[in-house]
Structure formats: structure tokens, C-alpha cells
Image (cartoon, coloured by chain):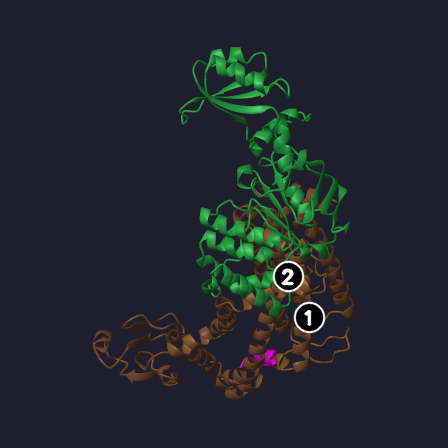
Chain colours: A green, B brown
Amino acid sequence: MNILEARNIVKDYTGHRALDDVSIEVPQGKVYGLLGPNGAGKTTLIRIINHITAPDSGEVIFDGHRLVQDDVRSIGYLPEERGLYKKMKVGEQALFFARLKGLDRAEAEKSLKEWFERLDIMSWWGKKVEELSKGMAQKVQFIITVLHRPKLLIFDEPFSGFDPINVQVLTREILRLKDEGATVIFSTHNMASVEELCDRISLINRSHNILTGDVDELRREFGKNKFTLEFDGNPDALRAALEASCTAVDIVEDVRRKHLAAEITLAADDARRAAIAAANAAVDLVEFKPKMMSMSDIFIKAVEQSNYPTPPEFPTHE
Amino acid sequence: MNNLYLIISREYLERVKRKSFIISTLLMPLLMLALMLAPTLIMVLSGPESKTIGVIDRSGLVAADLRDIDDLHFSQLPAVMPLDSAKTIEAFDGILEIGEDVVDYPSHISLYTKGAPSMQTETVITSQLEEALENRRLSRYDIPNLARILEDVKVDVHMSTFRIDTEETEATSSIVSYLIGMAMAMMLYMFIMIYGQMVMTSIIEEKNNRVLEIVVSSVRPNTLMLGKILGIGLVAVTQILIWGLLVCSFSKWIMPLIVSSMSSPDFDLLSAIGQLGDPAYVLMLFVWIMLFLIGGYMFYSSIYAAIGSAVDNIQDASQLTSIAIVPIILGFVFSMSVANDPNSGLAFWLSIIPFTSPMVMMARIPFGIPGWEIALSLVLLVISFLVMIWISAKIYRVGIFMYGKKPSLKDLIRWARYK
């Protein structure tokens, strides 16, 4: 079952189409990645899901019905650009936001105290926000986002500005919430930071959804017939030897490696043995293994394959 | 609805609890009071220390008429005493030399003092000499019973003005109405300006801070804007209520003290006190101030809110804020001329048009204008602030997510048209 569906969303700003017929389906209980470069339209899509801006056309279905304002109480959203009221005290402020999400005072206070204790920041309760460091403030923002136990959690660039230790703490807490039944959407341009966490992703580029799928399946599909090999010897000899069995042979320049490396794409599914034999004869083969596709690799491939022409640069309205 | 309440109470409490609010609320009336009382106080405190003036009256005619006043004493010296030897007498703070032919040439009078003479000393001496010389000249005509005649012809005019086009039969003084009107217009001008800008800066701060992005994930932008305007408006109302209380207690306890301490109470002042001492009248003024303050504040603060949402920082806002500031200042400036002629056509229209009506109406109300004019003005003000809030909410919704570009009025109008 899908907890969230966005159907054929279109959003125009003056002289710029931020989203062009974008659809996504987010399955219940999964971690969903919304990946793409800056200015692709991710934040606009998230604002529409959060009922902050309205789409020009298309609809958002949340938990089986059309999204309404009250649904934002079932959503926790950590925006990319985030801040707190500087002059307000941490505890007071957290209470304020919790109550905005519909919790009553006593309930909010109780679960706030639990969270503050779990993250070991109880001593900040009476401090003013302006006394906190950026990283400390982000922890508070995280708590504010998840406090009301939302069914859907949306994190926009969650790890930007966090130190590695806090990234770990945050990841642990997000996964814990997922185990308790929450659905999570990550939106980020830094694909490496979330690809291990995501079950399913959509790639957004220049206002279009250019690729959607399960991470494992995408990896398999895009990594099909791709291998990396390491060797000692003459790269040209290798290239010549593999001409028959491969469609592409790219020599990888990497000074960190002891050996030379190449990435190859087989011409046919059953050409692996032939390729190994040919390579073995031409050079001193050290390693031959299936290529691990990273999300960035897949993204670059998908952009190449997508039919959308590159539009001229517009100023981005983030 | 619950969210609106939460926003309002946060905006309100955060400001009211601030030390700066408490201090300025209490200090401002004290400052006003000090300004009002300062001239009197300065006079009292810097009044002349006891001074003795030696008088050499070469004519022998006027010195006898100089009377000691307060701390100024006159002491007659022989008419033939040379000036230079009189100057050396330690006991005198000054020497007044009156010429032989002073009755015909009143400029033949000189005052020699140690240190600069105070204004008051000079006034006392000249006025006494004028009176003495006038008497001397009059007596040359040999009119019998002169003193009685003079006493008899002395007149001091006090005119009571009455309105015949309203039902009020009370006497009103237009000077008092003028002063009250100006004070009220001034007050509205200040409040609308200060609190309107407070709405703007607070929105800019939220936007800059990016806390806005977090708030709007739980609250509709419209609710946030409205909550902010209402919350800050409540702060203004609180401040006025406190000041109202202070003014009331001032007029009840302190005013009588001032009046009784004054040696010669001014007629106008007395009638002002009489007018302000009437609880029904004061209450009426207070109700009108409140209504027009709320209307004017809502109208202008929603303009300020739209501007605040569109810009990234105060510097960028300065150009756009003229949209709000210019009419507010015009309203105040016009209210001064309106208070001089409260029933002119200009006065009528300026007090009906919402941009200037709050200030200008304040200047007219103390003169007692027809109720329907006030009602019409208020209704128009309410309608236009509702429209203005609606427009501003549309601009606000778009503006709060616009960063980096300095918007023009044209952009604002375009945003207002977005679906």
C-alpha cells in the first residue's frame, strides 16, 4: 500500500516550470529517496506534499485520500533551510512547535523530555537558542520534526552541516522510527549520503522524474554486463583483445591504485567467459568483478538516457 | 483555529515579557510628563536667588513705584550718587540708573549687573517701569479720579463657545479640542508606524532565520501572518491600556496638585481640565482611539506584512516601505491642518479615505462631528483592512519563499495575482 502518491504534478513559476508532470508513489514503511541536483524541483515537490504550496495541476493522495491541511499533522518535515527562534528558550520553543502539530501540552512535554534524555541534551532545556551551536540546534530541529510521531517523515538534505558523529546518531534514530512503522522520504543532492538507507528512489532532474525504482533492482539493471578489472600491462593491448566481446572499454585513471583498472561493458549476456579469456591472454589480470553501481553512476546514466532536452538555465526559485 | 491561538499567544507573550517592552511602556508616560512639566520645573528650580538692585533715580519720580517682587529687592540710593561709586557697593547685585527726563525719554534707563541678568529680572523691572511711567504721563492730563477710572475700564475677555448644530449644550473650547485632537492624531501616528514596522521586521527576521520554513510545515502561511498581526496588535492594545490607566490616575491625583500649585491658573488650561475631567467624554475619546487604532493598525500592518514577506533584509525593504510610510505621514500632516478647520471638505474626505482616515479622524473627533461620518469612516476602514489582509496574504504566501532577489512593487502585484 502506498502512504503517499503524487500524481502528475505541474508547478509553474514565472518563466520557469519547477515541476513538469511529476508522479511518485511512496510505499508504506519504506525509505524513499528523492534524488537529484540542486534546483531540480525536489524542494518544490516536498512543499506541495506538505501542503505549503499548491500545484498548478495534479493531485496528492495521502493515506488513501486527497491531501488536506490537517494531514500535515501526520507528516514530519525537516526543511533544508531551517532555523529556530533565536530569543526563545529551547524547551519552550520545542513545546510551541509540538503544540502546533496538535499535541496537548502535557503530552508534548512528556515525550519531549524522553527525546531530550535519549539524545542527552536535557541540559539545553532552559537555554536560549542563540546560545546553541549549529549542530546542537539541528538536533533540536530533528526532535521537533519527529516528536508528534508522524506517519510520514520528510527530510530535505538532512545531513548537511552535521558532523559525522551526529550523522550517525541521526541515522540511528531515523531507522528506529522506520522500524516503528514510519515511512521516510529523503531528499538530497548528495546521493552517496543516503543510498545505503533507501529502499526505493526517484531521480528528479530539470523538473522531471527521470527514473523510479527499487534500489537493488536499479543497481542490477544498470550494472548488468558491467565489470571492472584490474591488471598490469599495456592498456592498448587489453582494448584490442576485448574488441570482439565488449561494447565499451574504459581505462580508469586512478593514481591511488597499484594496478591499472578498466571498466568494461559486455556485448552479450554470455560473453563473460570469452572476455576473461581474452583479457587474460593480453595482460596480466589481477581482478575481474561485477561493477558496483553507485547512485551517482545510475543518475548520470539516466540523465543520458532521458529524452528531455537540456533547457536553458533559468534562475532557480528554491 | 487552535494554531492561530498558539501563534498569537507566542507573538504576544514573547514581546510583552521582554524587558524593553516593560521599560518603554512605563518610561514613555514619565518622559511625556517630564516634557510637560519641564518648563515649570526649570522656572521653579532656576528662579532668581535673592537679588538686590540699587536704584539711582535722577528724576526722583519713579523709584518709589518699584515694588519688591519675590526675591527681587530694590533699594533707593541718593539721586545724586555718581554711578561709579554705586557700582562699587558690594551689597548690590545690580544698579539701575534712571535718567532725569525719563518720563519723556523712556530709553534713558540703564541696568548694570554683576553677571548676566536673568530674563525674569529684566521683565519684572521693565514692566514695573512701564507702568510707573504710564501713570506719570497719564497724571499730566489732570483727570480726576484717575485711579478709579483705570480700575473700571480694565477688561479681561473670556469667550464661551457653543455648538448649535449638535445636541450638546456644553461649552467647548476649540483650543482644547485642537490640542486633544493633535495629541490623539499623534498617538495614532506613532502606534501605527511603530507597530506596523514591528510586524515587518518580525517577518523579515523569521524569513532570514529560516524558522519560517519550519513553522509553515505545521501552519498555513495565512494563519501565521494573521497570527502575527493580531499578536503584535494585542501588544499595542496592552500598551495603550496601560497608558490609559496611567493618564487617568495622573489626571485624578497629580493634575489637581499642579493646578493648585500654579499661582495664576490659565483659563484655557482650566477648561481643558474641566473637559478632560468628564469621565464620559474621556471614555468616548478612548473608545474612538481604540477603534481607529485597531482599524488603522490592521490596514497598515498588513501592507507591512506583505513587504516584509517579499524582502530578505531591512535594507531592501526601505524602498517598498514608502508605500506605507508616505500615507501615514501625510495623514499626520493633514491632521494638523484639519484640526484648524475640522469641517472643511478636505477634512471630511481625508477622514473618510482609509489611508489617512485614522489620523485625520482623530483630529476631528474632539470638535464633535456627526456620528454618521465616524461610522462611515470606520466601516470603510474595516472593509479596506479586510481587503488589504486578503491581498497581503496572497503576496505573503509567495514572498516568504523568495530569496535573493530584491523585489519591486510590480513583483508584489504579480504575486498577488497568483492562483
Q: Which residue is mark 1?
A: B288
Quarter of the C terminus of chain B within the rendering: top right
Instruction: Report the amino acid beneath label 1.
Output: Trp
Q: Is residue B271 magenta?
A: yes
Residue A45: percent from the left, percent from the top?
A: 67, 42
Determine contact: label 1, label 2, CB under 8 Å: no
SS type, badge 2? helix
Name the one closer to the observer, B64 or A102.
A102
Query: What label does residue B417 carry, if any?
Result: none
Q: Which residue is found at the position 53% from the left and 37% from the top?
A: A192
Please state the horizontal and vertical placement of residue B196, each as a whole percent of the image. 60, 58
Above or below, B331 against A278 in this view is: below
Q: Is residue A314 visible?
A: no
Q: Which residues are magenta?
A: B265-273
Q: Main secondary structure of the magenta part?
A: helix
The answer to whether dots 1 and 2 both sit on one chain is: no
Residue holding disc 2: A100
